[in-house]
Image (spheres, grey):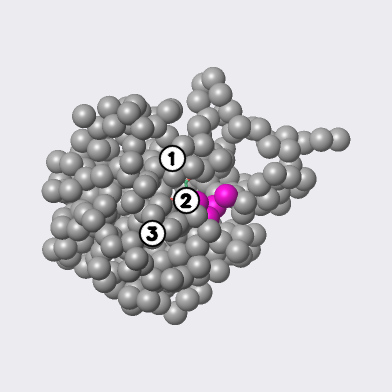
Amino acid sequence: MELWYTEKQTENVGITCKTSKTLHVEKTEFQHIAVIDTMQFGRMLVLDGMVQTTIEDEFVYHEMITHVPLNTHPSPKNVLVIGGGDGGAIREIVKHPSVERAVLVEIDRRVVEVSREYLPEISSGLDNPKVNVIYDDGIKHVKENPNTYDVIIVDSTEPVGPAVELFSGDFYRSVDNALKEDGLFVAQTESPFFNRDLIKHCYREISGVFPLTKLYLASVPTYPSGLWSFTMGSKKYDPESINSSSIPGYPTKYYTGELHKGAFILPRFVQDLLK
Ligand code: SAM
């Protein structure tokens, strides 16, 4: 018998994958967690019915949410990831020679434990000696750690449950406060096709706090619409002014120096969202 998994991405559209096995299902204090084996994308982590990451396409999201901010900052030493319990962002961050400390603040301990068990390809970086994993609310952590980080990465779930506040103006002000004087941050800000109001809201709120706000795009097949946005707020450095030939030569599958710059070239309808 064939078994298929569908994520309803909006009221009217979904993504459906043929599965070979359901490996894990549980309900934690914060969310439902599932890990399934899919025929097309390999192992898939699903939270509250929404695809978070898959073995086949995770590299796009994890490389783009990390290398763009880390190569915009000339020497990122202290880096914070909020959310990101699968460990994919951390795996990329520890590739950077300048990084001395990478802190992961994940609200749900079980996401980390399940990822360690079922997604070792993604979670492997969590064992790096530079990494400190803290189980706490990222909102509380940024409030309690002023002037601490060079780069903050908000690798959150969609704006539901404990992640709702991660998309608010108050949170962006706390992030600004937790960054050093030349710090910068990036948040995943969903699909320009399906989440236009959210993108407008985030861009407006981030622009109200940071002197430099820029949105960039990447193509992630298992995320709603396949086109994903990230919004950067920066106190000093412009992500489009980097010297792409000076990017360190660690291995990547999606990210390149040219793509770093190209990701900020936006289609007209996305430019219009930011006006
Ligand atoms: N790449 C993913 C995506 O866009 O679909 C996000 C992956 S990661 C698994 C998201 C994590 O954010 C979840 O594990 C969730 O528990 C965590 N999270 C949600 N709200 C949080 C908060 N307020 N503080 C810390 N972690 C939070």
Horizontal side of residue 18 vs 152, given as left or right: right
Residue at left offset 41%, top offset 66%: 93
Q: Is ligand 1 closer than 8 angstroms to the Cβ of mark 1?
A: yes
Label 3 vs label 2, nearer the camera: 3
**Dominant secondary structure, magenta:** helix
Q: Position of residue 38 (x, y in %)?
A: 70, 45
Kind of residue indicated by mark 1: Trp
Q: Kindly report the distance in space between the C-alpha atoms of the residues bearing marks 3 and 2.
A: 16 Å
Q: Position of residue 144 (x, y in %)?
A: 22, 62
Q: Is ligand 1 closer than 8 angstroms to the Cβ of mark 2?
A: yes
Residue 272 is covered by the magenta coloring: no
In the image as oriented, which residue stretches furthest toward the front? 245
Q: Residues within 10 Å of mark 3 (few under 14, many from 20)?
A: some
Label 3 vs label 1, nearer the camera: 3
Q: Give the labeled residue for mark 3.
A: 257
State the extent of the magenta-drawn residues as a range. Answer: 57-61
Q: Kindly report the distance in space between the C-alpha atoms of the residues bearing marks 3 and 1.
A: 19 Å
Name the disc covering residue 61, or none: 2
Above or below, comparing residue 37 to residue 145 in the picture = above
Comparing 167 with 264, the one in front is: 264
Q: Position of residue 260 (x, y in %)?
A: 37, 53
Q: Residues within 10 Å of mark 1 (few under 14, many from 20)?
A: many
Corner quadrant of residue 184: bottom left
**CB-based contact (under 8 Å), mark 1 and mark 2:** yes
Kind of residue indicated by mark 2: Tyr
Residue at left offset 21%, top offset 68%: 148
Kind of residue indicated by mark 3: Gly
Comparing 61 with 47, the one in front is: 61
Horizontal side of residue 56 vs 63, given as left or right: right
Q: Is ligand 1 closer than 8 angstroms to the Cβ of mark 3?
A: no
Q: Give the labeled residue for mark 1.
A: 228
